[in-house]
Every structure is written in C-alpha cells, then in structure tokens.
Amino acid sequence: MGTTAAAGTEGRGEAVGEEDGAILQLLDSLDGYISLMGSLSSSLRQGWLELSSARHSMGNSRISSVLFDMKPHSSATTVDLTVSTASDADQATQPHFSLLKWGSRGDEKSPSVEVDGKTPSQASSSTIYPAVAADNQVRKKRSKALSMFGALVPPKLRVAQGSFETSLEAIIEIANTRSTILSALGRLQTVDLRS
Amino acid sequence: MANRVQIPTNNSALIAMIADEDTVTGFLLAGVGNVDLRRNTNYLIVDSKTTVKAIEDAFKEFTTREDIAIVLISQYVANMIRFLVDSYNKAVPAILEIPSKDHPYDPAHDSVLSRVRYLFSSESVSSGRR
C-alpha cells in the first residue's frame, strides 16, 4: 500500500511539473506574441504612411487596386512550411513557418563556387557569381512588383515596399509564436484531462 | 521536451489576405500576390461595398486551400465574421488578425488570446469547485 501511494504521488508530481512547463511556455509565448503585434503595428503604420505619401505625389488613380496585375503569375514571396511530428502521441504537430522573400531565404550563405576550375578571384570579371546573380534576381522581382504602378515610381513607394517586407518578417514570427501558443494550450488541456 | 521527429514537409506556400486596399497593396508590393490560371487571387480587398457573405466565402476558401500557409485578416474584418474565425481551430493555415489603418489592433478581440483567456477562466472555475 505504501508503494502504491508513493507511485501515485510521483505520478501527480510529474503531471504538476508538466503543467508548470506548459504554463511557462504559454506565458512566454503570449508575451512574445503581444510584443510582436506591437512591432507589426509599427511597421504597417510606417508602410501606410509611405504609401499615402507616394499616392499623394503620383495621384490617387496611379496607385489603385484597378492597376493590380491580374495576369496569371506566381507569388515571388512565399512561406516555407515544415511540420514537426512528436514521437509522443499526446503532443500535437507544430508547424514552423519560414519566409522565402523574393524566392530566397535571405539567411542562406551563397556558397563560393569555382568557375571553370578557377576561384572567384581568378575568374574573369564577366562571369556572374551565384551571390551576385541571386541579388540581381531579387532586384528584378522587386522592380517587377513596383512596375504594376508604372515604369517610374517615386522613392516613397520603394520605401513603402521595404516597410511591408519588414512587416512580413514580423508576420512569420507571429505565426511561429501562434504555433507555440496553440501547442502549449494543447499540452495544458491534455495534462488537465489526465489529472 | 519529448523527442520530436522532424518530417521536412517542405512546401512553398502562399500568404492569403482579407484586408483593406492599402494593406493588400502594400503586401502585393512585397511580392505576396498570386493569380492562378483561372484568375483566382490569394487576396480579397474589403471595402464598404463588400458583403459579409463575400468575406465568409473568402475565409472558407483560403482556409481550405492546401497551397495557403498563412491567412492575414484585418481585425475589423475578422470581427464581422467573428464566429467563423473563433471556431477555426486548425494549425495550418495560420489565421493572423492584423491591424488596419483605421482600426488599431485590440488584444481583447484576438481569437488566439481569447482561447487562452477561456482556458484560464475555465481552469479557475474548475479549481474553485475542487
């Protein structure tokens, strides 16, 4: 009887520990979520202001939804989604989002490539190296996005584009934090059911 | 933390938007816009003429499409279809309520935070009963 009571106490202790862990994770994530929302609000406000400024200089009709490109085209900025599956069946899958801005991850380091057996410093200047080629691609995609409002756009519109790109980065972090919150909520509910 | 098996289901997915014109314009400038061969877009511009039914239909469409990972919805638009947004409980696509120019973000209405509040209020009720 003493052994059974000890085992029961140990089990309850584990459940309390698990619950505490989930609560701590939840509270941390909530704090992060609200803080990120503040950053997002700030970058969006900046973007709207710059967009209004650009509209003021170009004219209302020059920056309008009527000019949106309705020809079939793929999104240049996408999201890379990976899903981690826990070996423990009680834990839910947790998706992880990464931003592929203009088709590149941005934090990837371009590998140094030998061209025709020569190192980049030895090769001819006319050879385009992967890093430079990638930058050119990104620049082209950025220009293409701006070009729906005309060939010549004011600097404010380019700056607005940058602000909304920053907002996208915050959005990805918010999405990941949301995943963590939902995962912690799921764990809490599971621990609650067990106890 | 328990051992997690990482299954790299690498999928390049879209960001959908249900928001006002300026917000959609801004994100299109950031390269998020997608138009398929049937001229279906990954965004809905909400203005004074947009009906609640159109917003509901767009929400249902974006949350069931497999190529969409995140749905951005202006919080004031989410408030128009609050029941639908709050009853959505999938992990993907992630529904994120964002502020708009005329309606700042209000944590009290956010569906994720509401879920946390509900959990803690039900926990405090059940612990009171014990």
Image (cartoon, coloured by chain):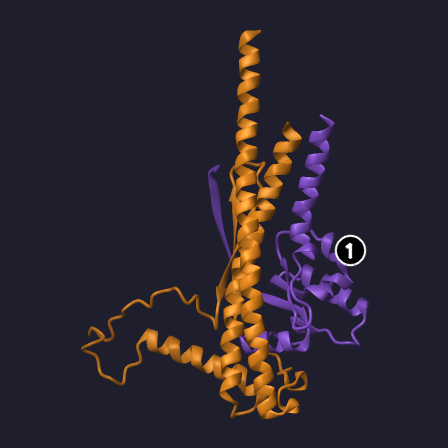
Please say if A122 is above or below A28.
below
Left or right: A98 in relation to B65? left
Instruction: Classify residue A186 by image quadrant.
Output: top right
Check disc 1 and report the residue beneath it: B83
Instruction: Classify residue A136 by image quadrant.
Output: bottom left
* Residue at image point 60% right, 83% down: A52
In front of the other: B95 or A110: B95
> How many labels, in total?
1
Task: State the image coordinates of residue B25 (x, y, percent, origin top left).
Answer: 61, 78
Disc 1 marks a residue whose amino acid type is Phe
Left or right: A92 in relation to B123? left
Please rate how many residues cluster around mark 1, counting C-alpha atoms within 10 Å: few if below 14, some from 14 to 19, many from 20. Answer: few
Q: Quadrant of the C terminus of chain B?
A: top right
Left or right: A165 in relation to B59? left
Query: For the residue labelled by badge 1, is the local secondary structure a helix, a strand or a loop?
Result: helix
Q: Decide if residue A174 is in sight here.
A: yes
Chain hosting mark 1: B
Task: State the image coordinates of residue A144 (x, y, percent, origin top left).
Answer: 51, 83
Q: Decide if residue B11 is in sight here.
A: no
Chain letter of the purple region: B
Task: State the image coordinates of residue A188 (x, y, percent, origin top left).
Answer: 61, 37
